[in-house]
Image (cartoon, rainbow, N blue to C red):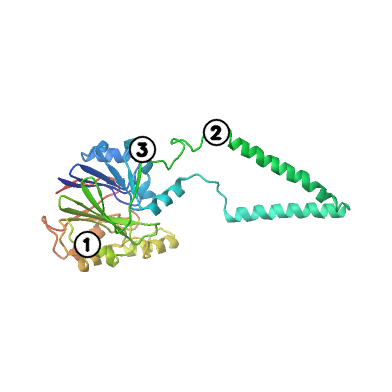
Amino acid sequence: MVRFTVLASGSKGNSTVVSGGRTRILVDAGLSCRELFRRMRLVGEDPETLDAIVITHEHMDHVNGLAVTARKLGIPVYFTEATHRAWMRWLTPRRQMTYAQWLEQCRKQAAERQAEVEAAAQEGEGDEPEAEAEPVAMATEAAAEAETAAELKPDAVWPPSRKDDPTWLPAVEYFEAGRPFEIGDIGVSPFTIPHDATDPVGFVFCAEGVRLAVATDLGYIPPNVKAQLQGLDLLLLESNHDLEMLRDGPYPWSVKQRVLSRVGHLSNEAAGEFLENGYDGQAAYVILAHLSESNNLPELARVTAERALNGRASLLANRLLLAAQHEPLSSINF
């Protein structure tokens, strides 16, 4: 049996379980580990049976609970290499200094050095700064040696322990967009999507002859994505915002521009355009996903999609469902 369960979909967290044969895959981990497990149990899924996690991209609403979930279950995580690196950079602690702060620090140091030179010149001690250079250099060298010695102490812990390393995962596997691979009984076909992440992808999953697609977080639908979203049994498609609600809504103009861009999010109208003119109409289920809570209404997304499907929706084909942010969608079985 093949099963598809959307646990959450929206800007506050995204996660879906795909089951086929003896394999269960978690697609994204955008909720906390505790909430993921709670929602899985609500729909009759046992978290302990998960075999792997696959990640579409590194944005917070797709990876929030990733590390804790993978560690708790001891399962591998599948990324593109670029997405893994971006996720690690985001998690790795580092000293924070803005360019303006660094510039101010340089100005202060230059001013102090200039003040010392001027004071020495006024006192007629032109030769003394050179004489003082050696003690200063010796002090700097001594400090560096002390720092190096501290780093090489026998009791120093390096590399950091797993507990101290926020990027540690039980196992990491890399894949490339356009190169299908398998996880147990499920075939996975990743494809590139246009979104403002490092290396974002969508997926087509295939098990027991059933094809299931996940296509969210994309600014538009290019030809390569259209080609992937054909001959499906289930399509999870983004319908993020209503154009008028977004333009009149509370977001700053810069955020509105990002959402509306070709690497932003798919509007109700864009999703409808694809369903009407680019979709072959073969899927048994079409699930609208990643609906904005601020810039969309479920009724608007549904009406736009129903109009685009133009009467093709029925109990046997193109049954239209809406994924929610705060509760899981009932499992769909094939």
How far apart, in angstroms, are the residues tagged by discs 3 and 2? 25 Å
Residue beneath the point at 36% across and 65% down = 262
Q: Position of residue 17 (x, y in %)?
A: 25, 46
Q: Residue furthest top?
A: 155
Instruction: Inspect the image, locate mark 2, and give the three-letter code of the amino acid beneath it.
Output: Ala
Q: Nearer the viewer, mark 2 or mark 1?
A: 2
User: Which disc, if any, is residue 126?
Assistant: none
Secondary structure state at the residue bearing disc 2: loop
Q: Dot 1 corresponds to which residue? A: 305
Q: Dot 3 corresponds to which residue? A: 71
Q: Position of residue 279 (x, y in %)?
A: 20, 64
Is disc 3 surrounded by few (<14), some (14 to 19) or many (20+) residues within 10 Å?
A: some
How far apart, in angstroms, are the residues tagged by discs 2 and 1? 60 Å
Asked whether the residues under the numbered discs 2 and 1 touch, taking CB atoms below 8 Å apart as contact, a structural biologist would say: no
Q: Nearer the viewer, mark 3 or mark 2?
A: 2
Q: Earlier in the sequence, mark 2 or mark 1?
A: 2
Query: Looking at this view, is 265 or 143 the one in front?
Result: 143
Residue 12 visible to the viewer: no
Left or right, 313 with reference to 18: left
Q: Position of residue 13 (x, y in %)?
A: 34, 48
Instruction: Inspect the image, locate mark 1, and give the three-letter code of the amino acid beneath it.
Output: Ala
User: Which disc, if any, is residue 156?
Assistant: 2
Q: Residue furthest bottom?
A: 277
How far apart, in angstroms, are the residues tagged by discs 1 and 3? 39 Å
Q: Position of residue 183 (x, y in %)?
A: 25, 47
Q: In the picture, residue 100 is in which quadrant?
A: bottom right
